[in-house]
Image (cartoon, grey):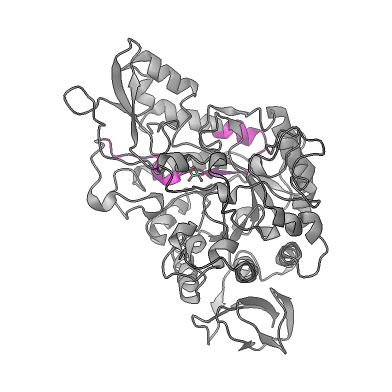
């Protein structure tokens, strides 16, 4: 494989990398069916290289019935026809490498699709079969097994068990699914399951993939007794208990990941993992990135922090301390495909506690786009100045906001149905990107496309297209391009240490990165005097007579 080699000069590339998240379904549609695909992505790779990121992470691209946007995988070794073919994937990896971009894919080990060959076999072969032992099948409770085996809850709403009909037509056993019923949980105590995933990792590493994001990494190990949840355990995915929860963040996951690390380390070029692990405390997260386990983990404390100096500083300090204690770099992320876009989170009065969805914010106050955008610009400079790696979710570089008025009939996130239409789910951050032109589909689909984008784009995104922002002074896109260019060149940025400056408080965050760079973020509404500096490297908005306005950040030269 000629171009399967990753870009050169990559020792520990994952410690500093800026990784751009491609939600492939919504990135660019090459064949005009309204669904983003590999052809569309390949056409836009030069854009990503020009933006200045180091790598791309793609959400699942495997064969899938799409009950949960591809997180229900039917075949881990093939590409869904809506996205392309295995040859397209190989070509994309090679083209990305030629442009200096590394490629990270998403692996979903907690559950398969209910259409996966293993699950079909498990249903067909009946109770007690080896095929059922790969999943969590149990007899029900009650006189006729009509009640679920325990009280576990699905993250998407409702119970976590579904009953099957046995091959002889009688009502049968129940299977566990911590997510949708179409996503049966695998049994990680089963040797075949373990061997299969190590083989899948090799399959993709052999094709040149540089890294793997691990979906719900904290869920794989279950208490074998499957005990009922106690009152304090019944919480959502973002609030895992600190220890001894029957299915979140259990000790057994670590041995699995030590095995995965050995697979990655058997390759001459560095392959890196990033864990999606929602743990109760940064110290618990740090356990996933000990030297013989995974390389990095997403920083959800930072992502969910409200736009408040005290909360951001706390997230920064606790993350750096916990991860530093095991020698792992931090990563920083503001948005992804599971949370409301940060322009929309920040454009409202900020609460004390964490925020993932807009329902956690005051609903009686209208969304302030100007404020949210201003804060998002400042947040970009804060994020890209912190020590470690960073993630950019597609469209944040264009300043996209959460689409809050999608018609009910078009909602696709299983959360909408499973919550009995009380939670609108995550579609609002997954709307297809606007690239060019003045009306939908804004260049997302080619001219003469036979279908509309799978979710409708707001007409107002006319002003946020890549084309409209390219070269435009003061655009979000040009801010990201400048920040990424400086970050790639400046010796102080990326991995390393930071020192808080004296005078930092909850209104003004100010820190120094050696050599010679200071980042100051004004979270108050008032103008503040800049600390000592020899020049301005980059600012998220204009200074006023040398003073830093509210919700503005600046990189200073020392
Ligand atoms: C992760 C994914 C999310 C998905 C879930 C189940 O949280 O990020 O999109 O729905 O896992 O696979």
Q: Quadrant of the C terminus?
A: bottom right
Which quadrant holds residue 66? top right
Q: Residue at x 56, y 29 (%)?
A: 64
User: How many numbered marks have been drawn onto this rendered protein structure?
Assistant: 0
The stretch in magenta equals 201-224
Could you say where residue 47 lies in the image, as x and y percent from the top left?
78, 51
The reply to whether residue 102 is in sight is yes
Q: Residue at x 53, y 61 (%)?
A: 330
The reply to whether residue 324 is in sight is no
Q: Quadrant of the N terminus?
A: top right
Which quadrant holds residue 63? top right
Examine the structure image and report whether residue 48 is included in the region drawn in magenta. Answer: no
Task: Indicate left or right for 372 with 350 as reference.
Answer: right
Q: Nearer the viewer, residue 515 or 441?
A: 441
Residue projecting furthest to the top: 168
- Residue 494 vertical position relative to residue 220 in the rendered view, above or below: below
Q: Nearer the viewer, residue 315 or 174?
A: 174
Could you say where residue 374 lies in the image, as x and y percent from the top left?
64, 71
Could you say where residue 511 lies in the image, as x and y percent from the top left?
58, 78
- Residue 341 vertical position relative to residue 473 in the rendered view, above or below: above
Examine the structure image and report whether residue 203 is included in the region drawn in magenta. Answer: yes
Could you say where residue 259 lies in the image, as x and y percent from the top left?
46, 39
- Residue 472 vertical position relative to residue 229 in the rendered view, above or below: below
Q: Nearer the viewer, residue 413 or 231?
A: 413
Q: Nearer the viewer, residue 365 or 178?
A: 365
């Amino acid at each position: 494989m000629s171009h399967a080699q990753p870009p050169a000069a990559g020792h520990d590339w994952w410690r500093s990398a800026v990784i751009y998240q491609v939600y492939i379904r919504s990135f660019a549609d090459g064949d005009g069916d309204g669904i983003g695909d590999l052809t569309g992505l390949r056409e836009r790779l030069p854009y990503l290289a020009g933006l200045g990121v180091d790598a791309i992470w793609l959400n699942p691209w495997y064969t899938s019935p799409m009950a949960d946007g591809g997180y229900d995988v039917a075949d881990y070794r093939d590409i869904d026809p809506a996205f392309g073919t295995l040859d397209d994937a190989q070509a994309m990896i090679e083209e990305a490498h030629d442009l200096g971009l590394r490629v990270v894919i998403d692996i979903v080990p907690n559950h398969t699709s209910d259409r996966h060959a293993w699950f079909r076999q498990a249903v067909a072969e009946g109770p007690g079969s080896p095929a059922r032992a790969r999943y969590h099948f149990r007899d029900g409770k009650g006189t006729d097994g009509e009640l679920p085996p325990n009280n576990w809850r699905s993250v998407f709403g409702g119970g976590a068990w579904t009953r099957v009909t046995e091959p002889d037509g009688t009502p049968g056993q129940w299977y566990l699914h911590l997510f949708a019923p179409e996503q049966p949980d695998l049994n990680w105590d089963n040797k075949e399951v373990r061997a299969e995933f190590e083989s899948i990792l090799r399959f993709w590493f052999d094709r040149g993939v540089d890294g793997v994001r691990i979906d719900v990494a904290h869920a794989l190990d279950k208490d074998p007794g499957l005990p009922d949840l106690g009152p304090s355990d019944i919480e959502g995915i973002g609030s895992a208990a600190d220890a001894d929860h029957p299915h979140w963040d259990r000790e057994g996951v670590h041995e699995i990941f030590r095995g995965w690390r050995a697979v990655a380390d058997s390759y001459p070029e560095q392959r890196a993992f990033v864990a999606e692990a929602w743990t109760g405390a940064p110290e618990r997260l740090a356990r996933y990135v000990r030297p013989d386990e995974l390389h990095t983990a997403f920083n959800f404390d930072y992502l969910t922090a409200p736009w408040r100096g005290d909360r951001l500083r706390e997230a920064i300090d606790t993350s750096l301390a916990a991860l530093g204690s095991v020698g792992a770099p931090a990563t920083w992320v503001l948005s992804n495909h599971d949370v409301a876009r940060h322009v929309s989170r920040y454009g409202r009065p900020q609460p004390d506690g964490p925020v993932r969805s807009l329902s956690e914010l005051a609903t009686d106050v209208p969304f302030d786009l100007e404020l949210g955008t201003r804060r998002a610009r400042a947040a970009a400079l804060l994020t890209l100045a912190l020590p470690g790696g960073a993630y950019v979710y597609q469209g944040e570089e264009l300043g996209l906001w959460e689409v809050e008025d999608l018609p009910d009939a078009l909602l696709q996130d299983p959360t909408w149905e499973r919550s009995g239409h009380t939670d609108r789910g995550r579609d609002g951050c997954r709307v297809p990107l606007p690239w060019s032109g003045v009306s939908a589909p804004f260049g997302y689909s080619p001219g003469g496309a036979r279908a509309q984008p799978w979710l409708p784009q707001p007409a107002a995104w006319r002003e946020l297209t890549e084309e409209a922002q390219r070269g435009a002074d003061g655009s979000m896109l040009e801010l990201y391009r400048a920040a990424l260019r400086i970050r790639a060149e400046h010796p102080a940025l990326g991995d390393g240490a930071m020192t808080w400056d004296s005078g930092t408080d909850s209104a003004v965050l100010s820190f120094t990165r050696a050599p010679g760079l200071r980042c100051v973020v004004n979270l108050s509404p008032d103008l503040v005097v800049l600390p000592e500096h020899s020049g301005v490297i980059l600012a998220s908005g204009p200074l006023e007579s040398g003073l830093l306005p509210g919700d503005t950040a600046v990189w200073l030269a020392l």
